[in-house]
Structure formats: structure tokens, C-alpha cells
């Protein structure tokens, strides 16, 4: 009985999207409004994650919040302007932007060690001769964040090269 109800609900959801093409072209998926909303929500979620991380050292995921806020913002945008209704793919673009941006901010150390690199913080340690600090400039931080962002990719490719022909039992 429950499976018949689930099948009926699945059929009704698919009927709603039956008139649409299966997957829109990439130009239709990557829209200006999805990037604007994604950028604004990335800033908001990043500040929330860094604040919570600095206060509690617990890192919230906030992926569901990003999805719901993206849906809400797109809904408001389309109601305020007489544009085409938003698509599921636009909401996915927003979620991807938010998760990637806030992930880079977290893995880059803005909620933990990035602020501790400066000479001002090193001076507060009580050791007057301490030379173990790095005042991060914007260009240094950009390079560091690029390295942190691509570290998994750069370390995973060499490890994968030797294993693609082997089968494990």
C-alpha cells in the first residue's frame, strides 16, 4: 500500500516537469541571477561559519540553509521581476557556489589559524624576540587559498595513476 502511494507521488512530481527538457543546456543553467544570489549567500554563510568556528570550534555544514535560502531568494527575484521562473539547476548552481566558497574560507583557516599568523598576534604571546610570524598580504592569501583549494586534486592524481589498471578483491 505504501509503495503504491510513493509511486503515485513520484508520478505526480515527474508530471510537473514532463514538459521541460531533461537537462537544460549549460547556458541556461549558469545564469546571472544564480551567480549574484550565490555570491551574496556565500558571503553570508561564510561569515556565519567563521563566527561560529571562532566561538565554538564547531564547524556547521549549513548546506541545507544554503539550499533553502537560494530557493527563497530566487523565488523573490522572479516574483519581483517578470523574468522566467527559476529552474532546479539554478538552485544547484547557488548551492555549489555557497558550499565551495564557504568551504574554501574554512579550509583556508579563517576560522582557526589564519589570524594567528600576523605579527600583532605574535607580539601578544609575551615573547619579545619572536620572529615566527607571517603578515599575510592579499596576494599571499590568494596564492595560499588556491593551493589549499587544489591540494586534494593535486595530491589525488598522482596517487590514482598507478591504480587504474589494478583490480582489488
Image (cartoon, helix red, strand yellow):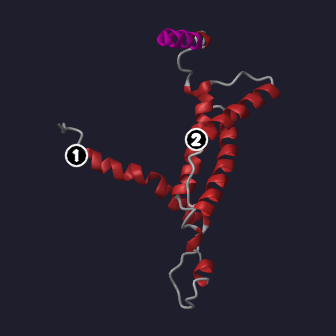
Tell me the SS state at disc 2: helix
Q: Position of residue 36 (x, y in %)?
A: 70, 40
The residue singled out by tag 1 in the image is 162
Instruction: Count neighbours of disc 2 (C-alpha within 10 A) and say few if under 14, some if 14 to 19, many if 20 or more.
Output: some
Instruction: Count neighbours of disc 1 (C-alpha within 10 A) and say few if under 14, some if 14 to 19, many if 20 or more.
Output: few
Q: Which residues are magenta?
A: 1-14
Q: Position of residue 159 (x, y in %)?
A: 28, 49
The residue singled out by tag 2 in the image is 63
Q: Is residue 80 left or right of residue 65?
A: right
- Check if residue 120 falls in the magenta segment: no
Viewer-side label of 1, 2: 2
> What is the quadrant of the C terminus in the image?
top left
135, 104: nearer the viewer: 104
Q: Mark 2 or mark 1, which is nearer the start of the sequence? A: 2
| Quadrant in the rendering for residue 66 | top right
Check the image and report above or below for 86 versus 161.
Answer: above
Amino acid at each position: 500500500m505504501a509503495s503504491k502511494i510513493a509511486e503515485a507521488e513520484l508520478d505526480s512530481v515527474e508530471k510537473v516537469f514532463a514538459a521541460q527538457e531533461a537537462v537544460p543546456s549549460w547556458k541556461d543553467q549558469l545564469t546571472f541571477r544564480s551567480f549574484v544570489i550565490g555570491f551574496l549567500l556565500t558571503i553570508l554563510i561564510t561569515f556565519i561559519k567563521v563566527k561560529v568556528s571562532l566561538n565554538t570550534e564547531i564547524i556547521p555544514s549549513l548546506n541545507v540553509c544554503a539550499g533553502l535560502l537560494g530557493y527563497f531568494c530566487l523565488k523573490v527575484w522572479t516574483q519581483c521581476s517578470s523574468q522566467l521562473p527559476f529552474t532546479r539547476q539554478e538552485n544547484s548552481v547557488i548551492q555549489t557556489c555557497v558550499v565551495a566558497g564557504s568551504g574554501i574560507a574554512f579550509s583556508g583557516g579563517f576560522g582557526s589559524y589564519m589570524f594567528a599568523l600576523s605579527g600583532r598576534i605574535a607580539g601578544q604571546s609575551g615573547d619579545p624576540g619572536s620572529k615566527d610570524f607571517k603578515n599575510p598580504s592579499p596576494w599571499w592569501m590568494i596564492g595560499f587559498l588556491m593551493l589549499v583549494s587544489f591540494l586534494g586534486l593535486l595530491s589525488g592524481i598522482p596517487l590514482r595513476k598507478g591504480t587504474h589498471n589494478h583490480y582489488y578483491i
